Image (cartoon, helix red, strand yellow):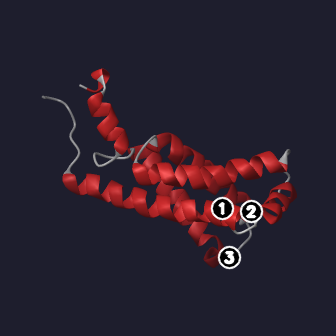
Amino acid sequence: MAGKKTMSSAVSFGLLWLRVLAGLGIASHGWQKIAGGFMPKFITGVAEMGFPMPELFAWAAVLSELVGGALLVLGLGTRVASLAVFVTMSVAVFIHHAHDPMKVKELALAYWTMSGALLLMGGGRYSLGSLVKKKTPSGR
């Protein structure tokens, strides 16, 4: 396989670690909003940020956290899931928490950074996406 890049086990394990920790964390935030009864307050907050159709945007954000986080844990559709989380965390960091002190916005900034890294690097060797790719004819 001359010229083919292979990912080291350490990098693959690092991506697994990053996916699982970021995915569980962000998914738990989405779940808290739904199961904890915070959606009405969250929808109000989205409206106050000036988004049109605040219910739609609030649900899109929550589902990006919940479903996107679960997909990150599994390593399935990692780049798409990371993009959804990255966009949601961009709004959280740069709009919602724009004027807040670092100690208030640091968790959203951490998720923004982790999802951005996964967006660029993908899920790695230890992911369902990698396993599926190997089993398809085009995965060679």
What's the distance in space between the residues labelled 2 and 1, CA to CA?
6 Å
- Sooner in the amino-acid sequence: mark 3 or mark 1: 1
Quarter-of-image position of residue 13? bottom left
Kindly check if marks 2 and 1 are in contact, taking CB atoms under 8 A apart as contact.
Answer: yes
State the residue at coordinates (65%, 67%). 32
Kind of residue sitting beneath label 1? Val
- The front one of 113 and 75 is 75
Relative vertical location of residue 109 with respect to residue 8 in this rendering, above or below: below
Kind of residue sitting beneath label 2? His
Which corner quadrant holds the N terminus?
top left
Q: Residue furthest front?
A: 35
What's the distance in space between the residues labelled 3 and 1, CA to CA?
11 Å
Q: Which residue is mark 2?
A: 96
Relative vertical location of residue 42 with respect to residue 137 in this rendering, above or below: below
- Mark 3 Cα-neighbour bin, 10 Å: few <14, some 14–19, many ≥20: few
Kindly check if marks 3 and 2 are in contact, taking CB atoms under 8 A apart as contact.
Answer: no
In the rendering, at what x and y percent does residue 133 appear?
32, 32
Q: Which residue is mark 3?
A: 101
In the rendering, at what x and y percent does residue 125 appear?
28, 45
Q: Which mark is residue 35?
A: none
Q: Which residue is mark 1?
A: 93
- The front one of 69 and 34 is 34
Could you tell me how many numbered marks the image carries?
3
- The front one of 71 and 122 is 71
Which corner quadrant holds the C terminus?
top left
Kindly check if marks 3 and 1 are in contact, taking CB atoms under 8 A apart as contact.
Answer: no
- Mark 2 Cα-neighbour bin, 10 Å: few <14, some 14–19, many ≥20: some
What's the distance in space between the residues labelled 3 and 2, CA to CA?
12 Å
Q: Is residue 126 left or right of residue 69?
A: left
